Image (cartoon, helix red, strand yellow):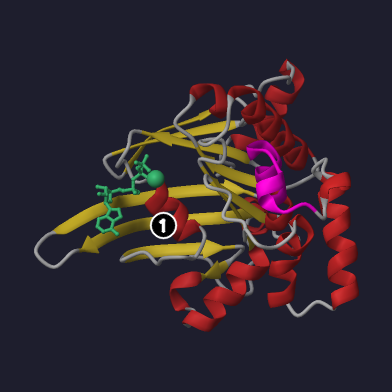
């Protein structure tokens, strides 16, 4: 038996450091009054810091339910969700929304930008909630828009931008508070093929710069950009595979394979 004075095995401490997401026996029941629907059935899942994961599955398989829990927008009915080592089940609602603001950047299919305000102000918004000064907000928002390739468009309103450009603004907004986790639910669902590819190349760039990205998609071509593909069916995780991402060679795959192997 492990005693407090004993040293933890190296693999155990490594896992605590690296696991950004850990779901343990997560069940989600939607209680609609007359019937109860099982959205997730005992899901166990660990995602390490720096991974790029695609979640796939048919309509109704539980992808958005999972994303809502990962994004602290909803809680599991049973089981535990540890985000960056914090058990979210234990947190009061206020702390949960503070964690959401600090640790998670969201990207949605329909962009969810505020229509009557500029790209710059849209990107500044999460920093306002984080009480960052006006000058610092503006400087950082400009840098973020440059990072997503929209340096010359920061005064444009959303309706003056293409779908792909709007999604870039949404990605810059998601990065505003430097969250360790980017969650994207069908981020290319409203985009044409060329814009979808550009957005996926942007996620690939952010991932290479160190971001942890978890995205939901229905399209194999989009999932192909990720380093790991997880599939759901009827609320259960049915497959979890490493993938050689597009534009990456065998050496990178070997590193991924080593890192992806559980150590204990
Ligand atoms: N608010 C809700 N109330 C009741 N049932 C719900 C609710 N949200 C989701 N469900 C049910 O939970 C299951 C999983 O739904 P979920 O939205 O997670 O699927 P999905 O994989 O995201 O589907 P899609 O690809 O269509 O977006 C489905 O059976 C759905 O009907
Ligand atoms: Mg969904």
Would residue 74 be visible to someone looking at this image? Answer: yes
Residue 101 shown left or right of residue 38 in the figure: right
Q: What residue is shown at x 82% (from left), y 60% (from top)?
A: 141
Q: In this orientation, which residue lies closer to the viewer: 104 or 157?
A: 157
Q: Is residue 16 above or below residue 98?
A: above
The residue under the point 88% across, 54% down is 143
Magenta span main SS: helix
Range shown magenta: 156-169
Density class for disc 1 (Cα within 10 Å; few <14, some 14-19, many ≥20) is some
Residue at (46% x, 78% y) in the render: 90
Identify whether 169 is placed above or below 82: above
Q: Quarter of the image holding residue 28?
A: bottom left
Where residue 180 sits: x, y (%)? 69, 57
Residue 77 or 199: which is nearer the viewer? Answer: 199
**Nearer the observer, 3 or 101:** 101
Which residue position holds label 1?
24
Residue 109 vs 261, above or below: the answer is below
């Amino acid at each position: 038996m492990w005693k407090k004075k004993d040293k933890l095995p190296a693999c155990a401490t490594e896992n605590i450091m690296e696991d950004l997401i850990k779901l343990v026996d997560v069940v989600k029941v939607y209680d609609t009054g007359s019937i109860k629907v099982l959205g997730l059935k005992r899901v166990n899942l660990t995602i390490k810091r720096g991974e790029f994961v695609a979640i796939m599955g048919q309509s109704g398989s539980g992808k958005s339910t999972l994303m809502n829990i990962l994004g602290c927008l909803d809680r599991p009915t049973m089981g535990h969700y540890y985000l960056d080592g914090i058990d979210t089940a234990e947190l009061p609602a206020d702390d949960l929304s503070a964690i959401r603001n600090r640790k998670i950047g969201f990207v949605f299919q329909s962009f969810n930008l505020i229509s009557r305000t500029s790209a710059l102000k849209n990107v500044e918004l999460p920093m306002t909630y984080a009480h960052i000064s006006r000058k610092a907000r503006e400087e950082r928002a400009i840098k973020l828009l440059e990072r997503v390739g929209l340096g010359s468009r920061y005064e444009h309103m959303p309706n003056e931008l293409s779908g792909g450009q709007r999604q870039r603004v949404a990605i810059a907004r998601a990065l505003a508070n430097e969250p360790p986790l980017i969650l994207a639910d069908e981020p290319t669902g409203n985009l044409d093929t060329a814009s979808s590819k550009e957005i996926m190349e942007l996620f690939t760039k952010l991932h290479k710069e160190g971001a942890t990205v978890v995205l939901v998609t229905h399209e194999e071509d989009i999932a192909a950009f990720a380093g790991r593909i997880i599939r759901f069916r009827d609320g259960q995780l049915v497959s979890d595979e490493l993938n050689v991402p597009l534009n990456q060679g065998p050496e990178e795959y070997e590193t991924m394979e080593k890192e992806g192997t559980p150590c204990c």
